[in-house]
Image: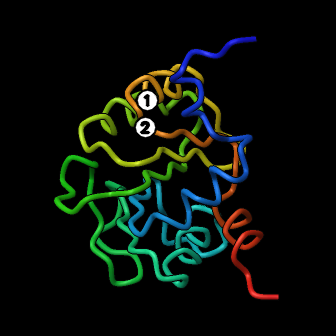
């Protein structure tokens, strides 16, 4: 089967590409981040922050998380973003994908259990790498944790 070239930008099952993405990225905008410490939408980005990544929370409900100012939308962020990480339901993803096109990050990452093929196609066709249904915390630990 021949894939359209944009389909190569959906890297969810390409572990080497996922590893390279995490290795080369430094900034992560987190849509749906919370300050509720037992939720993955808190402890996954907190782990990435502790690993040296710059985290930018995107949530209209909070002013700050971990002393970091929150934004209500991606368009408010002035610094370059490598990865847009999303903690929202699958059916809520498309508007975030459309907004992501405006800031042109390296990748769009949907956490475990989150899949939206229309959003993936939209972004991948425009050269943005897409990861769906994967946990950034689990992947980072498996690739980079010291034994």
Q: Is residue 37 left or right of residue 147?
A: left
Seen at 59% across and 33% down, the residue is 10
In terms of secondary structure, where does tag 2 sit? loop
In terms of secondary structure, where does tag 1 sit? helix
Residue 23 at x, y = what percent? 55, 67
Q: Relative to residue 131, is residue 64 depicted above or below? A: below
Q: Quadrant of the C terminus?
A: bottom right
Q: Quadrant of the N terminus?
A: top right
Residue 36 at x, y = what percent? 56, 71
Numbered label attached to residue 112: none
Q: Residue furthest right?
A: 147
Disc 1 + disc 2, Cβ < 8 Å:
yes
> Which of the 4 quarters of the picture holds residue 100?
top left
- Asked whether 42 or 139 is in front, the reply is 139
Disc 2: which residue:
128
Disc 1: which residue:
123
* Dot placed on the residue nearer the N-terminal end, 1 or 2: 1
Residue 76 at x, y = what percent? 18, 53
Seen at 51% across and 22% down, the residue is 121
Residue 15 at x, y = what percent? 73, 51
- Asked whether 88 or 5 is in front, the reply is 5
Seen at 73% across and 81% down, the residue is 145
Q: Relative to residue 146, is residue 103 depicted above or below? A: above
């Amino acid at each position: 089967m021949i894939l359209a070239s944009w389909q190569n930008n959906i890297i969810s099952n390409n572990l080497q590409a996922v590893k390279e993405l995490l290795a080369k990225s430094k900034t992560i905008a987190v849509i749906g981040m919370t300050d509720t410490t037992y939720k993955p939408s808190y402890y996954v980005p907190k782990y990435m922050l502790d690993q040296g990544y710059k985290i930018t929370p995107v949530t209209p409900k909070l002013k700050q998380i971990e002393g970091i100012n929150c934004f209500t939308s991606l368009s408010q962020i002035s610094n370059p973003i490598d990865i847009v990480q999303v903690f929202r339901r699958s059916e809520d993803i498309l508007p975030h994908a459309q907004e992501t096109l405006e800031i042109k990050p390296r990748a769009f990452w949907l956490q475990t259990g989150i899949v939206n093929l229309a959003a993936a196609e939209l972004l991948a066709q425009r050269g943005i790498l897409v990861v769906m249904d994967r946990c950034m915390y689990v992947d980072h630990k498996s690739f980079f944790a010291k034994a």
